[in-house]
Image (cartoon, helix red, strand yellow):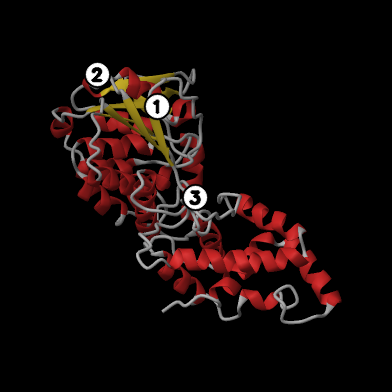
Amino acid sequence: MGKLGLVLAGGGAKGSYQVGAYKALLELGLRPDIITGASVGSLNGAMFTMGKLDEAVELWTSMDVHNVLEMPKSADRQELRDFFKDVVDSGGLDVEPLGDTIDKYLDEELLRHSPIRFGLVMTVKETLESVRVQMEDIPQGQLKDYLLASSACFPALRPRCIDGVDYIDGGWRDNMPLDFAAELGAEELIGIEIDGVGITRPNNTGLPTRIISCHWSLGPMLDFDKDRAARNIALGYFDTMRSFGRMGGTAYGILPDSDDFLRKFAAAYQEVLSQVTAIAPELKLAESLARQLAKFPPEFEPDPTAPTRGALAPLELAAERMGVDPSIAYTPRTLALTFLGSFDKDPADRYPALFGQEEDRGRQLGERAMAAAASEDFVTALVSKALSQVSLF
């Protein structure tokens, strides 16, 4: 393996996801030689370059908005008026609390002497020029200013002035600085995407590149919430492990299927689906459409050589539909059990005619229309019906 570049995109409070991803990379033995970042990616990148993963976990899981932004702590009307007037007059929210947080964790000498090369991007407010800055080019004692400049998500946050120049969030012009990592000597790239604002440039490096991103929403950019951060850390870990073949699934972190449950579920699901589509052929398309709308593989076509291919997607879709927690790892069986425990009224009860429990033709036509119109609910019902035919214990 050549020199590995880790590229951390911007996205505000969503950055907790990158901590879980980095934890997984280290467990996989993938320690980067180069790290580049934009916005919150530069802050995480500095922590990773210093070797402070545990501290990064501590930071994110104890953080609230008052650790990042200067916000009023009371609902006094006059205080709120003064606060918002200051925000408007100053061109954004004050991030001095974030500066204090950086002071707590930043060890500039440790970062400067790290074997990992570190770089960040920021944007000149006046010209919107993207500026790439290597660690060795940052003057001694000014690292915090550069990190805050890279993270100044204008117009929500105030620009950061360095040597008379106002800088704003690096993500405005280059939210995933892959080219920068290549410029610093990377020969392979891993990017951690968190759906931030700004411009994500095409990857023109020509280098082998793996982008890790999340099926789930990671939350609002400025909503710094410790519980959401813990969830996002778990999601980043699972998604990275999945990307390298250590876990299965699309939305959930799926552990090995040691008891052959998925094969049994696949057979039951295919049988129920075939029975329904024999009555209503158009619902085959509805089943496929539901997968696409929910960002799952669109086809369910098991074959004798791969009887479980595609079987996990409807189970995951149904679990997501019923609000099953994605921050926990599951086997296929425990995911099915958790799904079944997530509702009081069985989703399959909405389709008694389609599932052969009633022979009312008028009701059957109504259920066909309902299934086609609410295809994700229909798949959820299919999963529940299939699981009723599988031994779960």
**53 on left or right of 356:** left
Residue 351: quarter of image: bottom right
The residue drawn where x is 31% and y is 51% is: 60
Q: Which residue is mark 1?
A: 177
Q: Which of the two labelled residues, at mark 3 and mark 1, occupies the earlier sequence position?
A: 1
Where is residue 180 shown, x and y percent of the image?
36, 22
Which residue of the protein is positioned furthest toward the right in this rendering?
Answer: 362
**Number of the front mark, 2 or 3:** 3
In the displayed structure, 131 sits above or below 281; it is above
Per the rendering, the mark at residue 215 is: 3
Residue at 83% in and 70% down? 365
Q: Residues within 10 Å of mark 1 (few under 14, many from 20)?
A: many
Q: Is residue 68 something that shows in the picture?
A: no
Residue that label 2 marks: 137
Q: CA distance from mark 1 to mark 2?
A: 17 Å
Residues at circles 1 and 2 in contact by the CB criterion of under 8 Å = no
Q: Nearer the viewer, residue 303 or 27?
A: 303
What amino acid type should be assigned to the residue bearing mark 3? Answer: His
